[in-house]
Image (cartoon, rainbow, N blue to C red):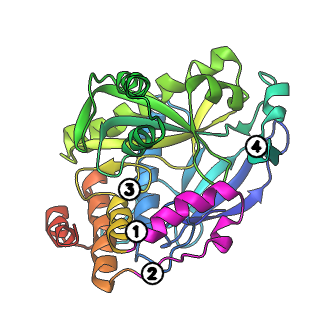
Amino acid sequence: MGSVKDLIVLEKPLGNKRGLGRFVFSDRYSVFDWGQMPDKILNKGRALAVMAAFNFEGLQKIGIATHYVGLANENGELIEFRDLKDRSNGSDTMQVELSNVYRPKEVKLEGRLGYDYSFYHENRGRLNNFLIPLEIIYRNGLPLGSSVFKKIEKIKNEIADPETREKVLQKIYEGYGLKSEPKPGDMLPEPVIGYTTKLEPGDRSLEDRDAYKLSGLCDEDFKDVKPLALAVNDFINKQAVDKLGLNPHWDGKVEMAYFHSLEIVDVVGTLDEDRFGTLVSKEILRQWYKRNQPEFSLACDEWKKTGEGWQERCPVKPVNLPSDLVSAVSQMYQAATNRYVERRIFNVPELEEVACMLAGFG
């Protein structure tokens, strides 16, 4: 299915009939949309599965629809989060309902690579049981590594006229509720929702009007996307920040499907989808590559524009991480999950101790 988890299809979705499948969470990881990186992080997959199950069950309790069915134990039997035993390492398998996926066609537009979403345009408001081809980003703050800073830097480099450049930048700042240029570590006055593409080789940023055009949703349903994403963000904030002090909760993403109404799919609120605190996310791995192999992240930015299979064509390949960093990140995933779910599912040190180890790589 992807670089970090595999999908076992038990029943294929057909028309308005839901499918059924199982996510098997691996110890692989990905940065910069590269796909599988050269190292594996022990128990990362199990930590993500446990954290995601906890969130799905919590969201369902407050009335938010999801595609989550349950976790699977070692015998393949369906269980709930509460059935997991302490120090058991949890589960790496999750059962979910499946929706149809309609991929846009790769096309050449005026000599440049583009994607044809005409299927979504032509069937707007008539589609049901389908994955919405968007990633919905919620931002509470702007950590080091946020794509917002890349967007600002790009405008500074591309617009020569000072007056025009300043007007464009001010419009961006205002979109985040700010009056002036932010710096890494700034929190936003209110959470902000943004969109990127989901079914393209790279995540392409979209304005609200473009996200609507690509979504396949009618206007009334699209208006519910932001409130639903904000409700997920609020749930994660209450658990991570208010209850457990994983502060700040910088940002995260959700994916949605439509089956008679909107529902949350894939996974939410894990350390791969969201960024917490200063060292609690896979952002530390992105930053390690930016410092120690900067040519790799730069090459990814350029080659992902060339379409499917760009990883094979890219001449710069990622190097291995130091073994002690891999070990520390493994413990980070497990310790953060313990803290978040308020259980000792994994037998690792407390998060504060692990964070001290990770600080040495900052």
Residue 261 in which image quadrant? top right
Start and end of the magenta stretch?
Answer: 293-320
| SS assignment at label 2 | loop
Question: Badge 3 local density, few (<14 within 10 Å), some, or many (20+)?
Answer: many
Instruction: Determine which residue is flagged by label 1.
Output: 294
Q: Earlier in the sequence, mark 1 or mark 2?
A: 1
Q: Residue at x 85, y 39 (%)?
A: 15
Residue 149, label in figure: none
Q: Main secondary structure of the magenta part?
A: helix
Q: Amino acid at mark 2?
A: Val
Is any atom of residue 316 visible in this view? Answer: yes
* In the displayed structure image, the side of residue 306 where residue 149 appears, left or right: left
* In the displayed structure image, the side of residue 11 where residue 235 appears, left or right: left
Q: Is residue 61 above or below residue 352?
A: above
As for residue 72 lying within the magenta part, the answer is no
| SS assignment at label 1 | helix
Q: Amino acid at mark 1?
A: Pro
As measured in the structure, the alpha-carbon distance from the residue carrying label 1 to the one carrying label 2 is 11 Å
Q: Earlier in the sequence, mark 3 or mark 1?
A: 3
| SS assignment at label 3 | loop
Instruction: Determine which residue is flagged by label 4.
Output: 115
Q: Amino acid at mark 4?
A: Tyr
As measured in the structure, the alpha-carbon distance from the residue carrying label 4 to the one carrying label 3 is 30 Å
Check contact, mark 4 vs mark 2: CB within 8 A.
no
Question: Badge 1 local density, few (<14 within 10 Å), some, or many (20+)?
Answer: few
Instruction: Determine which residue is flagged by label 2.
Output: 319
